[in-house]
Structures are given as structure tokens and as C-alpha cells.
Amino acid sequence: MNFWLVLTVNSVTFGGLLFLLASGFSLIFGLMRIPNLTHGSLFMLGAYIGGSIVIGLFGFKMNFWLAAVLAALTVAALGALIERFLLRQLPGDQLAQVLVTLGISFMAADFCLMVWGGDPMSVTTPEGLGGFARIGGAVFPLYRLAIIAIAVVVAIALWLLLDRTRLGAMIRAGVDDPDMARVVGIRVSQLFTIVFALGAGLAAFAGIIGGPILSVYPGLDQDMLPLALLVVIIGGAGSLLGSFVGSILVGFIYNFGQALLPELAYFVLFLPMLLVLLLRPQGLFGRHVP
Amino acid sequence: MIDLIAGTNRLRLIAIAVVLAALVTLPFWVSGIYYINVGSQILFFAVFALGLNILVGYAGLVSLGHAGLFGISAYATAYMLQLGAGHTTAIMVALVIGVASMAVFAVLSLRSSGIGFIMITLALGQILWGLAYRWISVTDGDNGIPVRGRPAPFGYSLTDPVNFYYASLIVFIVAVAMVFIFVRSPFGAALMGTRDQPRRMNALGYHVWMIRFYACLFSGLLTAVSGILFVYYTNFISPQTLALTASAEVLLMVISGGPGTLLGPIVGATLVVVIKTVVSGFIERWNFLLGAIFVAIVILVPEGIVPGSVRLWHLIARKRAATPAAAEAEPTATERTP
């Protein structure tokens, strides 16, 4: 009984982390029509930068949460630069843009290896959240509950941003019909930079928040990127609800798979993807087939 | 076939003969087993790149999961040999598994083309990688599977690097010939039609999905063949071979050389293998360089090295021919055919 409960909490936690990662990925995909293959690297970069600040970088040491925000902002700025100076060179050529993001992801991975070395870096759980909460007869790690809360807050904030603000309306217009959005005077390419930076920042934030659970190691990027891809394939590109449902689903399948069939955990992920592709190629909440 | 050869001009025939002669005599004028081994690597990676080029160049479908297919054939060979099967059985099983996996890949990813195809093949490739990495009872995880011995067809033991080089060369020549015939066949023309105008091809009564599916199978066959050569070359297979980096490497071979050309993937494979061999001799930062080359090629020479230099050559040749009558020479519009 307890085993299942703990597994469920872990799945929701992991789903929450995935949501932070995949919502940006999905927005970028929906708007720019490209899968951003640097997304895993941005996640890892955020984790490394944040982790270094927590440990202390050049005598510069910060509280976990401030470090997380700072890492997210740094990586968001990096994302804006990538969009502005590399992807912007290839307007409308999605294939070339994907290949550029792929190239950057290798450079970023090797850069991390060069700077932080091959040994995993452990990030300590923020103060006050190292304990456990007793609910009924079960015991839950506080930090995991905190991650779920953060994911829910971010989800609501993103929903408000997309649904209630002018910027959100412009982004939605760009996702639905970029040409028509341009015709009515929305500067879609400016939105590209904003959304790319937002997605990069969210990915980095997810990286550092996930640090205490996943730890940070070379190859983390290649572990996370396929999961983000799966979330978007399952949930549908450009849909916030889709990435939310997809993340929780993938979180559950991945964690249960790892606990019950550890050797085939990765392969079990294949099944929901198969079903979605066969029955609903645009994804559960997507509007069009990519 | 005769008129196919007659159709190519004499200069090209001479060039082909020279390159072929150079390849056949390579073990005699290259000193050292090290360089012969580099030659073998170039040859089987060229076969791999030719296979991927069928999809990237001629079908317009970019796959980022081909290392998974390459690796699954290699794993199948190694696993069968570990079970005690003979070389012939192992190779046959590996070919069947490689092509069958490609069929599964194709059925899933051909639901879309373009970016969707990239995403799905990437996800599938990563799943195969994850399987190789975690399915320890079959693949032994990160330790990989060693392969002992190489086959000895007709009494020539491939353990000798020179013999292995010739075996790779034969496979390479057969692969090039197959692709050459394929591209010039009506089926090849139909495939390029589905790349350029899928809707029109559909309206003309071609079964676009089926054409793409068969192209995938052909690509899968070449990939499986190169995977088998690879596992016999290294005598070892580990999950690294299936990583996204490996898929990107072979894609770089195709894209740097020039997708949709016969020569492009071969030039690209040579380039990538040589750079990788030279670079990894003195620095460890191959992946960084790989990424940098990728970005540079995509932004600066998007058409690839072979079409790029062909265009340059034509430009120079035309300028030289046009100089005597430069005033009358009209700029031709046929220069850039899409």
C-alpha cells in the first residue's frame, strides 16, 4: 500500500518537473514549428549553473531559490541569444533550424563536460525542505511535495499568461496561424525570441529544481530530451493542457516502469507514444499533425 | 545499364576509374595497418551515409534515429554470435532484424513528414538506445557485447585488416551500384517526385506512403549492412553506438557532403571519419567540434560540399568559356535548378 503511494507521489513529482521542461518545449514547437533539440542541454545547463551557485562560485554563494531564479534568467538570456543570432539567420527553414539546435546541444554538452567534469554533482535539498510530512499513515518527502506545488503554480501562471494577457493572445494567434497573425500586425518573429527565452528559462529552472532529486551528470540532457519529445508527441504541440496531461502521464509510466520493469523502463514509454501516433497523430490536445 | 554508362560523360568515367584504382590499390601504397583500418571505416560509414541519404536526400525525410537501426543490427549480430550461432546465421538474422526495425520505424514515423518525421525517429532512436543501455540481461548494459573473430568467406580470413578492407570495399561498391541504379530507376524518380511534390504525385495516382515505405526499407537494408560491418570491425558493441551523437554524425556526413547526390555522402563520410580520427588523436573535444561543424555547415554551406563545389566549378567553367564572347553571352536561367 505504502509502496504504491510513494510511487504515485514520485510519479507526480517527476511529471511536475517534466511539465516545467516540456511546457516551454511545446510552446516553442507550437509557435516556431521546430522541436528545440537544445532543450535537454538547457535543462542540464540550468542545473549545473544553479548547482554551482548553491555550492559557491568564485566565493559567490546564494540561497537555493535565488540560485534557481538566477540560473533560469541566465539560461533564458542564452536562449534569446541563440534565437536572435543563429535561428534568425535561417528564417522559415525549419529543417536547418532543427539541425542548428542539434549542433548547439552537442556543443553545450561538451562545454558542460569541460567545465564541470565527468563526476556527478549533487545539489543539496534547500533548507527547511529536507524533512518529511506525515499524512495519515504515509510519509512523504517535503521537497517532492514542494516540486508538485511549484509545478502547479507555474502551470497556473503560464495559463494566466497565455489566456489572460495581451502577450498570451498574440502567442496563441501565432500558434494557430502565423501568417494571419502577421497580417493583423503581430510581430511574430519578436514573439519567437520571447517564447524561446521563456522556454529556455523554464527548462533551466526545471533543471535546478530537479537537481536534488536527479542529481546533475553528463548525459542528463540526453535523458531528458526524449521525455520532453514524448510529452509533446502525446500531448500535442503548442497546447498547455496537452503538456500538462502528457507530463503527468509520462511521469507515471516512467516511474512505474522503472519500479516494476527496471530493464525495460525506456521501452515501456514507447507504448503510449505508439497508441497516440496510431489513434490520434496530432496528440491528445494538439490541433494539427506536425 | 549500358546506356546509363554511356550517358555519363568521359571525364566522369575517367575520374571514377582513377578513384576505383586508387581504392583497390590502397593497401599497396599506404604504409601501416592504421591507415588501412581508417580506410575500412570510411568505406562502411560511407555505406551507412548512402543508406541515410536515400531518406534525407532522395525522399526528403530527415531521420535522427538511424544510429538506433545501425546499432540494432550490430547488437543482433553480436548477440547471435554470443548464443553460439555461426557467422552466416548471425548476419542473416541481423539483416532481417535491421530491416524489420526500419519497417516499424517507418510505419510509425511516416504518419507525418518533415519535422514530425524527425521528432518521431529521434524518439524511436532514443528508445532503442535506452533499451541497449538498460536491458542488461540481453545487452549487458554499458559493458557492451564483445565479438570474437571475424568470418572467413572463401577462406580469406577477415581478421587480416587488408582482407577486411577488401570486403568493405566490395560491399561499398555493391552499395554504390545499388544506389546508382535505384536513383535512375522509375522508382527513384517517383521517390524524388514524392519529395518535391507529394500532392501532385498523389493526384497522379502514385501511392506516396508506399513509395516512402519502400525507400525506408532500402535505407534500412544499407544501414543494417553497415552496422554488421561495424560490429565486425570493432569486435565490440556498446550503447554509445546508438546514441543521438552517432545519428547526428551520420547525418552530418550526408548533409556536409551534399544530400541527394551519389558522391555527397561518400565525401561526407571521408571528411567526418578523417576529422574524427585526426582530432581525437590530440584533443578530446570531438563532440564540441561536431556541433560547431554542424552549425557552420547548416548556416554557411546549406547545400553541402559536393553541390557547392560543382556550382563553383560550373561558374568558373562558364566564365572561362564566356570570356571570348562575353558581350553576347546571355546569363542563363538554368543555373539554379531546384
Image (spheres, grey):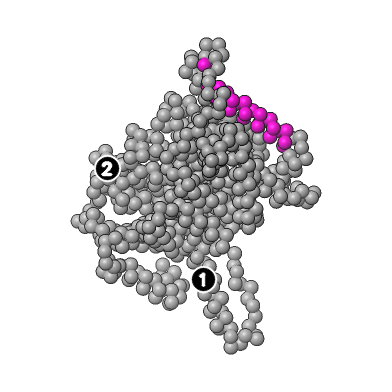
Is residue A94 visible in the rendered image? The answer is: no
Q: Is residue B166 above or below residue B142?
A: below
**Mark on residue B81?**
2
Q: What residue lies at 55% left-to-right and 11% top-to-bottom? A: A136
- Please tell me which residue lies in front, A98 or A9: A9
- Please tell me which residue lies in front, B182 or B30: B30
- Please tell me which residue lies in front, A135 or A127: A127
For label 2, the crowd category at 10 Å Cα-Cα, with few meaning under 14, some 14 to 19 and many 20 or more, is many
- Image quarter in which the C terminus of chain B is found: bottom right
Q: What residue lies at 63% left-to-right and 55% top-to-bottom? A: A85
Task: Give the x, y percent position of residue A165.
Answer: 76, 37
Q: Is residue A85 above or below residue A18?
A: below
Q: Is residue B155 left or right of residue A205?
A: left
What is the CA distance from the residue labelled 1 to the residue labelled 2?
Answer: 45 Å
Please report, as a chain letter, where disc 1 is located.
Answer: B
Q: Is residue A164 left or right of residue B208?
A: right
Q: Residue furthest left?
A: B155
Q: What residue lies at 77% left-to-right and 48% top-to-bottom? A: A186
Q: What residue lies at 48% left-to-right and 26% top-to-bottom? A: A256
Task: Give the x, y percent position of residue A79.
Answer: 61, 47
Magenta residues, as a range?
A139-162
Residue at mark 1: B310
Q: Is residue A76 above or below residue B281?
A: above
Q: Amino acid at mark 1?
A: Val
Predominant SS of the magenta segment: helix
N-terminal-most mark, 1 or 2: 2
